[in-house]
Amino acid sequence: MRSVRMREADVRKTSLFSVIINVMQALVMLVLAVYLWKGESLQKETVTLIRWMAAAGALVVGGGAILDIRDALSARKLSEAADAMEKTMEDMEALNNTLRVQRHDFLNHLQVVYSLMEMEEFREAGAYIERVYGEITSLSRVMKTANPAINALLQVKTAACDRWKIHWELEICSPWKDLPMPGWEMCKVLSNLIDNAIDALKEVSDRKLRITMTEDLHDFRFEVWNNGPMIPVKRQTAIFLSGVSGKGEGRGMGLYIVRETMHAYGGEIEVASLPEGTCFRGWIPRDPGREEEEKEAGTPA
């Protein structure tokens, strides 16, 4: 079964190799200096020994460099994971605050409605309920998955849509229970896709965004659609590459991170962009191990 393992950077091992590498570099430089200074007067056996020592030093330095690069990549992955988890915690805190505020407001609404009914102002009570209905139900629309982290993310992103006056639709057709990847990893995927959609819609007057989450016997599936400008056909095949972006220099990591995260769990992501809108579709297999076995066997999933 395919699994994702992030190696922790071994500080003790890294520091030990760093000392060894620096010592070997110093020795190699010293040996080379002696060789260049007294090369003509040295015996043949001594010259051969010096060359072997230089070669051994070069191998140690090269091996240490490889280990340093590996540990640096591991540290980078850990840093990215920590950043994603921190963002998820912030989203969950925002969701918690919203729930507390809505609970307080809901109690106030109940008191107002009760007072109006007690005064037999039934028509005014009905009108008041209609005015606050949308506010009360907006949060419940994003509280339909079995994953609190995803619920928190959706609440934050739909609130952002409201601020940008984007007409958003959220279709959660399944609870996404037993998702075969951590919730914060899926949040990383959805967050980048929704942020990209919001950015695209800033150039549009009638802004629309739709998020769909479903599942079937084999996969968990999602779609993020917006009616922003069409992505040129030539760019559609390159937007998932590192550093490719239409937002300026130093951008373009979001979709690359999305694809790498999906691939790490046996999933896939694709884009379809037409003049009427752009849709990113992704799916994660329920059992990544079974998916790999079927690919190797040449049988359809």
Image (spheres, helix red, strand yellow):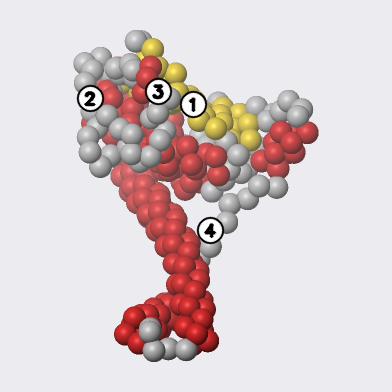
Q: Nearer the viewer, mark 4 or mark 2?
A: 4
Q: x%, y% of residue 8?
A: 50, 66
Mark positioned earlier in the residue sequence (1 or 2):
2
Q: Amino acid at mark 4?
A: Met
291 sits to left or right of 44: right
Q: Nearer the viewer, mark 4 or mark 3?
A: 3
Q: Amino acid at mark 3?
A: Gln
Residue situated furthest front in the rendering: 40
Q: Amino acid at mark 1?
A: Glu
Q: Which residue is mark 1?
A: 270
Does the image show residue 28?
yes
Mark positioned earlier in the residue sequence (4 or 3):
4
Count of all numbered marks drawn on residues in the image = 4
Asked whether the beta carbons under mark 2 and mark 3 sit within 8 Å of each other, the answer is no
Spatial CA distance of label 4 from label 3 is: 30 Å
Give me the residue at 66% from left, 41% from top. Answer: 288
Mark positioned earlier in the residue sequence (4 or 2):
4
Q: Which residue is mark 2?
A: 202
Q: Amino acid at mark 2?
A: Lys
Q: Classify 75 as above or below 11.
A: above
Q: Classify 76 as above or below 205.
A: below
Q: x%, y% of residue 105?
A: 30, 40
Q: Which residue is mark 4?
A: 6
Q: Which residue is mark 3?
A: 236
Spatial CA distance of label 1 from label 2 is: 23 Å
**Figure quadrant of residue 35:** bottom left
